[in-house]
Image (cartoon, rainbow, N blue to C red):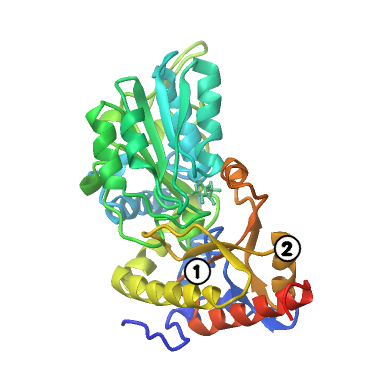
Amino acid sequence: MIPSATGYSPFRDEFPELSVKVHGHNLIYLDNASSTLKPMAVLDAERNFYTTTYANVHRGVHHLSQLATEAYEDARRKVAAFIGACSENEIVFTKGTTESINLLANSWGSIVRSGDEILVSAMEHHANLVPWQMLCQRSGAILRIVPINEAGELDLQALDEMLSPRTKILAMVWVSNILGTILPVEEIIAKAHRVGAIVMLDAAQAIAHMPINVKALNVDFLCFSSHKMFGPTGIGILYGRSEYLTRMPPWQGGGDMIRDVEYNKATYADPPLRFEAGTPPIAQAVGLGAAIDTINAWGWEAIKVHEKQLYEHLQDVLNSIPGLRKIGYAKQRTAVQSFLLENTHPYDVGILLDSMGIAVRTGHHCGQPLMKSLGISGTVRASLSIYNTTNEIDRLGHSLRKAARMLGIAS
Ligand code: PLP
């Protein structure tokens, strides 16, 4: 069913947390880039798993352990199908995007040498910056930052000039959590491959907003977090091409990642288990599988149509507010908008909106270098999802006008 633009979302009823009152107001949740709310299907799947099927995985002959293993591996198959991977063996379960990038920086990073170059953009989340800084400190590799223009778009000409046979890894965000920019990733991947670099995409902000096919993209690694796509916290994905994963050493040692262990040495399991030391997030995987089923049932067409209407309405509403400056106005965007009210601190605006029941995020959004380059300390960020409505955006507009009056910048 295609949702209408009339201030309603047919998906709202599936999200029980939307009925919460905040300071006496109906909650308006506009912090979806940070984490999405959870539909009943995900909550039910986890509860059902814990009450009927739960046991530890992979090491038990008993009935429940086998059922739990089957459920865990079934979730892996669902993830593989969801992103168009060749095989479920290309799907590594991690704690989230941050851990996926750290895994890659540590494991693939072990072949990086002094003088090699690693490219990231000027709009990375700290999760796709600090692990590479740490790798460069360890290895003597050089981290290079591809600049962006004023609108928040990647400077593709600069990228061309920076790519060279010295570039070993290009690790880049697909959708900026701060600016909402959608990067032209097909073009970027092709350019990087031409110089022999491997490419990792940080799809944390893409995964809930657009269909992804890693084969069609021809990307080498891709990572995302379940909690940003209606699934549970504590689980995320590192997708890696089989031919690369099989060459990568483990980065953490322990149970489940081994083939054979002696007192002074060990051999390791094949991927993906090689990278999943210890008891994994089992029920979370089941919840993630339910989130994928739910997104598939909604359908990308319905999601895209609704989010487009919301995005356009948000732009209209924000454009009508005197003294509001938008941060990030790239041509290709998702439903994320950072902004500032002139002469106010984002934190004050966020606190006032909260007092009116509206959840937005304020601050540097884990992008301190970008904030510094823009000469600001932070922004207010409204980020939309499938359950938001145009009425809620109208209320954001009214509340921003009220906040501006309370902060003495409008009459
Ligand atoms: N990358 C981007 C673009 C993000 O927006 C985020 C979280 O906001 C992350 C990485 C880190 O995700 P997580 O905290 O789930 O590891």
Relative depth, front residue between 112 and 19: 112
331 shown above or below 389: above
Nearest to viewer (mark 2 / mark 1): 2
The disc labelled 1 sits on which kind of residue? Answer: Leu
Provide residue 169's location: percent of width, then percent of height. 37, 29
158 shown above or below 77: above
Q: Is mark 2 within 8 Å of ligand 1?
A: no
314 shown above or below 213: below
Provide residue 151's location: percent of width, then percent of height. 45, 54
Provide residue 58's location: percent of width, then percent of height. 42, 41
Q: Which mark is residue 57?
A: none
Q: Residue 301 sits in which quadrant?
A: bottom left
Q: Callout 1: helix, strand or loop? A: loop
Mark 2, residues whose alpha carbon is within 10 Å: few (<14), some, or many (≥20)? few
**Which residue appears at 47% of the width and 86% of the height?**
7
Q: Which residue is mark 1?
A: 384
Q: Which residue is mark 2?
A: 344
**Which residue appears at 51% of the width and 22% of the height?**
136
